[in-house]
Image (cartoon, grey):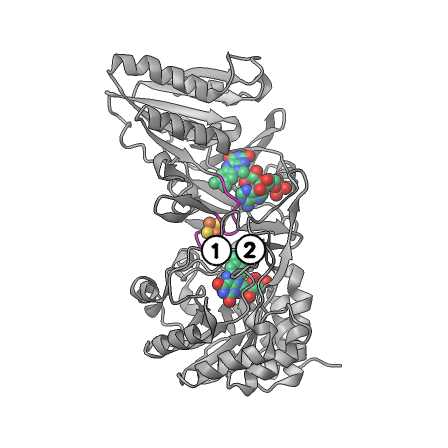
């Protein structure tokens, strides 16, 4: 991990309260793994005082044919003072950023294997790290299940499709795709799939806590391995303060260092 | 002129007066990617107890105006695992390591911990944390602290003093009526130095849920929000006791660090600011050197307690 002042090269609203920011940070980009995050100091004042963590949504290169990653991208939703300030930061300004942080997804088991099926389950902002993951996983059989409250909050459908996913959508109000919870979609996918027994399923999920809990329950029932990315309040982001712990079968673990990605079955 | 930054804390000689505060620097490993740890004046470890402690239920932190609350509850692996797994890295740093210890169970545990630390060559000093607001909550109310009672303070420091020759630092809580009374008790009991201040007991509420933001309701407030209180306590203690004072509480930059020396601190500890900028302690250290040079002050000793009134 490194700490650096990185230039903002793009920072715009793309939908409702959702923003997309691209930052020039080759030193972070080249080491990033899907599921890892960056911790950003959003203002030069005391308000807000602590850094704010954001998942690495993608890494990118400036030009076609240049495969050395140079930029990192984040997606964020304005929910309070820090994200409000971030949305006001302009192209050309610098952000003090630390990363890449944490333990990302272990996707070696599905990557390049032909007998596996990758199932990505995203709730709301949870799409952010899963797009990066989807772009990394080469195996053909990939399903992305996107859950949101309403159609206007369905994010990254195109990005998942472009990276080769079969995309299914669930909205609470039925304004897009299946009416109901994204976890219900997951259950359906597993049910149809378990009848064929051709492929071994692997679930990767990110989203609100109740959704992740449901994912863990379903994964257990259908005996499918699942990795989930957890969000906890973070003070340091580097494993020093012991503030961000989650309860696991082997005691408290730090979401920022031992996670944010955990095996679903290890979490209590 | 190159200003002299070295200071003495009891028998302990520090090459510079900037250390990192207990609980905000892990066991130093976490910071090795960001800076040259060798440049630190000293490292104070996360507080260690005799037995492993799992700490309080999460959530354990939240942000507050110009600061934060924490209710970690001294999560640590216990002294034996610490010695086996964490000490080897610390030993190699070549920086004085100050061992912060706390008791879950009265003065006897402090004595046992001090005896064990006394045998460890690399323990440059022992810091008695008798001021943690996050262990021993009484039905959701903050605990009663040893350092809120001069007699209890005297008893703990005195019993530890009898079993170790190592430099003893007593860390005090600001949640008291008179800080000098407690500081004097620690001095009388044989402490070599005083560390001021631990976090202030506080709380914060999520109004939508009408729930406390910390699972155990109350926690310890740190960061710039507490600096004026910390500074005043250092000043007050400096005027009442002879022992060197390690000042801390809300130091985030060079000027806030200098305030503490001028008020009477012989050394300073950087706490919460490490979370915001992991290499801040080194930046502050070189800033102090520049300040001294610019003002033609030959050494940090000359700055200590130099407040003009
Ligand atoms: C590993 C991780 C990855 C994340 N990835 C993304 C992402 O890709 N996109 C995105 O929009 N959001 C992400 N978040 C959440 C994001 O950090 C919060 O939205 C942001 O901190 C809110 O800051 P604020 O000042 O705008 O809001 P505040 O007013 O500070 O708080 C609003 C809410 O955000 C939570 N929050 C505040 N500070 C933190 C913090 N330091 N750590 C965790 N939660 C906090 C609070 O508990 C509160 O409920 C992630 C969080 C974590 C832990
Ligand atoms: C997350 C966190 C954990 C802490 N843990 C300890 C601890 O284990 N032992 C201790 O003596 N003080 C602990 N402290 C208190 C600090 O060492 C310091 O006294 C206090 O935070 C004030 O300084 P600051 O405002 O610079 O942070 C902790 C503080 C924080 C923020
Ligand atoms: S946020 Fe400090 S240990 Fe995770």
- Is B202 left, or right, of A30 in this rendering? right
Determine which of the numbered discs, if any, sits on residue B70 in the image.
2
What is the residue that sits farthest to the front in this orientation?
Answer: B139
Residue at image location 24% in from the left, 15% down from the top: A198
Q: Could one spot residue B283 in this view of the protein? A: no
Q: Position of residue B288 (x, y in %)?
A: 57, 71
**Residue contact between numbered discs 1 and 2, judged by CB atoms under 8 Å:** yes
Q: Position of residue A134 (x, y in %)?
A: 38, 26
Disc 1 marks which residue? A241
Does the beta carbon at disc 2 come under 8 Å from ligand 2? yes
Q: Chain of mark 1?
A: A
Determine which of the numbered discs, if any, sits on residue B109 in the image.
none
Q: Position of residue B99 (x, y in %)?
A: 42, 71
Residue at image location 60% in from the left, 75% down from the top: B149
Q: Position of residue B9 (x, y in %)?
A: 49, 81
Does the beta carbon at disc 1 come under 8 Å from ligand 3? yes
State which region is magenta. A231-244
- Residue A266: within the magenta? no
């Amino acid at each position: 991990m490194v700490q650096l002042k990185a230039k903002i090269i793009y920072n715009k609203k793309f939908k409702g309260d959702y923003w997309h920011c691209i930052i020039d940070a080759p030193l972070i980009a080249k080491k990033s793994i899907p599921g890892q995050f960056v911790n950003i100091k959003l203002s030069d004042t005391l308000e807000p005082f602590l850094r704010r963590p954001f998942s690495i949504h993608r890494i990118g290169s400036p030009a076609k044919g240049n495969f050395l990653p140079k930029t990192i991208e984040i997606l964020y939703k304005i929910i309070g003072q820090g994200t409000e300030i971030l949305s006001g930061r302009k192209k050309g300004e610098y952000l003090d950023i630390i990363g890449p942080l944490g333990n990302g997804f272990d996707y070696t088991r599905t990557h390049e294997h032909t007998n596996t099926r990758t199932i990505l389950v995203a709730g709301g902002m949870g799409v952010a790290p899963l797009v990066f993951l989807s772009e990394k996983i080469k195996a053909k059989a990939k399903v992305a299940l996107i859950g949101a409250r309403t159609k206007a909050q369905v994010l990254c459908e195109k990005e998942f499709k472009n990276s080769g996913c079969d995309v299914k959508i669930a909205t609470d109000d039925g304004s897009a795709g299946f009416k109901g919870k994204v976890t219900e979609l997951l259950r359906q996918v597993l049910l149809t799939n378990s009848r064929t027994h051709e492929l071994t399923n692997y679930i990767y999920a990110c989203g609100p806590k109740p959704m992740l809990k449901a994912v863990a329950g379903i994964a257990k029932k259908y005996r499918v391995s699942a990795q989930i990315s957890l969000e906890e309040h973070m003070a340091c982001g580097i494993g020093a303060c012991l503030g961000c712990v989650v309860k696991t079968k082997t005691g408290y673990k730090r979401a920022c260092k031992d996670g944010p990605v955990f095996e679903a079955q290890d979490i209590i | 002129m190159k200003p002299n930054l070295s200071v003495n804390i009891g028998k302990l000689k520090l090459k510079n007066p900037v250390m990192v505060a207990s609980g905000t620097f892990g066991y130093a490993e976490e910071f090795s990617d960001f800076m040259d740890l060798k440049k630190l004046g000293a490292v104070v470890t996360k507080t260690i107890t005799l037995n492993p402690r799992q700490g309080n239920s999460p959530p354990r932190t939240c942000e507050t105006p110009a600061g934060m609350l924490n209710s970690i509850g001294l999560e640590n692996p216990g002294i034996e695992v610490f010695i086996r797994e964490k000490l080897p890295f610390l030993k190699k740093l070549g920086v004085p390591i100050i061992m912060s210890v706390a008791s879950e169970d009265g003065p006897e545990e402090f004595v046992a911990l001090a005896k064990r630390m006394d045998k460890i060559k690399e323990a440059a000093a022992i810091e008695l944390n008798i001021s943690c607001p996050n262990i021993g909550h009484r039905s959701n109310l903050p605990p009663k602290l040893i350092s809120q009672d001069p007699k209890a303070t005297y008893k703990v420091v005195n019993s530890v003093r009898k079993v170790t020759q190592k430099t003893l630092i007593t860390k005090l809580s600001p949640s008291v009526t008179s800080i000098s009374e407690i500081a004097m008790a620690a001095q009388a009991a044989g402490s070599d130095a005083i560390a001021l201040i631990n976090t202030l007991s506080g709380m914060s509420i999520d109004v939508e849920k009408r729930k406390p933001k910390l699972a155990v309701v109350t926690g310890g407030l740190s960061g710039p929000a507490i600096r004026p209180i910390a500074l005043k306590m250092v000043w007050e203690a400096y005027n009442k006791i002879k022992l060197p004072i390690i000042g801390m509480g809300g130091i985030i930059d060079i000027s806030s660090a200098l305030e503490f020396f001028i008020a009477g601190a012989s050394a300073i500890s950087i706490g919460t600011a490490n979370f915001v900028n992991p290499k801040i302690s080194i930046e502050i250290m070189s800033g102090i050197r520049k300040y001294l040079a610019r003002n033609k002050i030959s050494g940090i000793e000359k700055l200590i307690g130099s407040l003009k009134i």
